[in-house]
C-alpha cells in the first residue's frame, strides 16, 4: 500500500483532440492537455475489435445502404433548393452532393412526383371533359401512375448509369460516383412536383411555358455540374453530352404533359 501514488489532474485542461486513422482501420484519438499528449484507441464495444470504417462495409449488406439515408432536414432542404436554381460556375454535385450522396431525398421526390402526376393528370382530364361520366361514375386512368413510375425510376437509374459509364470510359477530368450522379438526378426532379400540379390549368400556352421553365431550371443545374467533367474531351463528345442531358430532361418533361 505504501507504493501507491496518487496524482492530481484537476489543473490539466484538454486543449486539442485529433483523430488519427490507423493502418488496421481503427481510430486513435490524440488528446493534448497541459503540454502532455495521450493517445486512446477506440475499440468496438461488442467484440473488442477495431471499428470498421463505413467505406469498408459489404456492398450487399443493409448497413452499406443505410448510410445513404442518414441525412438531416437542413441537408435535404439545401439540396432541394439548389437543384432548382442554376448558377454559372456552380457545380451542384461537387458543392452539395459530394462527398455524402443520399438516396432519401431522391426516393421521396420520385414517389411524390409519381402521385402528383397521377392525381393531377386525372384531375386535368376530369376538368377537360367537363366531368363526363360513364354510368354515373368518372373513370380514372390509373395507368398514369404506373406509367409515371416506370418512366421516372427508369430515368433516375438508367441515365445516371449511362453518364457514369461515359465518364469512366472517357477517363474524364472529374469523376463522379454512380450514387452521386443518381442523387443529383433525383433532386433534379424537384421542380417538376409543383409544375405537375399546375398542369391542371387548361391552357396549352401555360403548360408549355411551365415545361420550358422547369427544364431550363433543373436541366442547366445538371449541365453546369457535368460540364467540368467533359470540357477537356473532344468538342463533339463534350457538347453532345450536354445536349443529351438537356434533351433527355426535356423528353421526360414532355412525357408528363
Image (cartoon, rainbow, N blue to C red):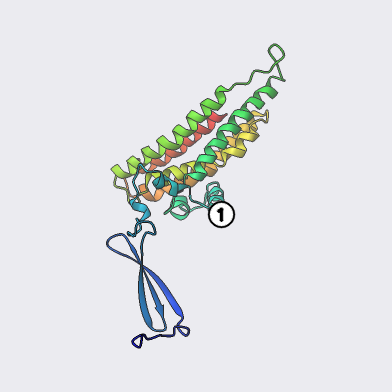
- Depth check: give the residue in front, 163 or 220: 163
Give me the residue at 40% from left, 75% from top.
31
Residue carrying label 1: 74
In the image, residue 142 sits, relative to residue 173, either above or below, namely above
The percent position of residue 243, horizontal first and vertical second, equals 43, 39
Q: In the image, what residue occupies the spot 49% across and 41% down?
A: 186
The residue sitting at the top extreme is 135
Towards the viewer: 159 or 99: 99
Count of numbered labels shown in the rendering: 1
**Which residue occupies 40% across, 40% down?**
160
Q: Position of residue 28 (x, y in %)?
A: 35, 67
Q: Is residue 69 above or below residue 7?
A: above
Residue 165 is left or right of residue 8, and the answer is left
Q: Secondary structure at mark 1?
A: helix
Give residue 239's quadrant in the image: top left
Near mark 1 (Cα within 10 A), the count class, few <14, some 14-19 or many ≥20, is few
Image location of residue 39, percent across then percent down: 35, 73
Give 149 or 58, whichever is nearer the viewer: 58
Q: Is residue 67 above or below residue 127?
A: below
Residue sitting at the far front: 1
Q: Judge from the rendering whether residue 11 lies leftward or rightward of residue 19; answer left or right.
A: right
Amino acid at each position: 500500500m505504501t507504493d501507491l501514488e496518487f496524482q492530481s489532474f484537476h489543473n490539466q485542461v484538454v486543449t486539442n483532440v485529433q483523430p488519427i486513422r490507423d493502418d488496421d482501420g481503427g481510430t486513435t484519438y490524440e488528446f493534448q492537455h497541459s503540454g502532455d499528449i495521450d493517445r486512446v484507441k477506440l475499440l468496438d464495444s461488442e467484440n473488442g475489435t477495431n471499428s470498421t470504417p463505413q467505406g469498408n462495409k459489404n456492398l450487399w449488406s443493409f448497413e452499406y445502404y443505410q448510410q445513404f439515408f442518414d441525412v438531416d432536414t437542413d441537408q435535404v432542404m439545401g439540396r432541394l433548393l439548389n437543384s432548382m436554381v442554376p448558377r454559372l460556375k456552380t457545380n451542384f454535385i461537387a458543392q452539395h452532393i459530394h462527398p455524402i450522396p443520399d438516396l432519401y431525398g431522391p426516393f421521396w421526390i420520385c414517389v411524390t412526383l409519381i402521385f402528383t402526376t397521377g392525381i393531377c393528370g386525372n384531375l386535368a382530364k376530369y376538368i377537360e371533359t367537363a366531368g363526363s361520366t360513364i354510368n354515373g361514375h368518372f373513370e380514372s386512368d390509373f395507368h398514369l401512375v404506373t406509367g409515371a413510375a416506370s418512366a421516372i425510376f427508369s430515368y433516375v437509374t438508367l441515365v445516371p448509369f449511362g453518364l457514369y459509364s461515359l465518364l469512366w470510359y472517357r477517363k474524364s477530368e472529374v469523376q463522379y460516383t454512380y450514387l452521386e450522379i443518381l442523387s443529383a438526378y433525383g433532386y433534379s426532379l424537384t421542380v417538376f412536383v409543383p409544375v405537375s400540379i399546375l398542369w391542371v390549368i387548361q391552357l396549352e400556352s401555360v403548360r408549355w411555358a411551365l415545361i420550358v421553365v422547369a427544364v431550363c431550371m433543373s436541366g442547366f443545374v445538371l449541365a453546369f455540374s457535368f460540364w467540368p467533367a467533359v470540357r477537356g474531351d473532344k468538342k463533339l463528345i463534350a457538347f453532345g453530352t450536354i445536349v443529351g442531358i438537356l434533351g433527355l430532361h426535356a423528353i421526360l418533361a414532355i412525357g408528363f404533359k
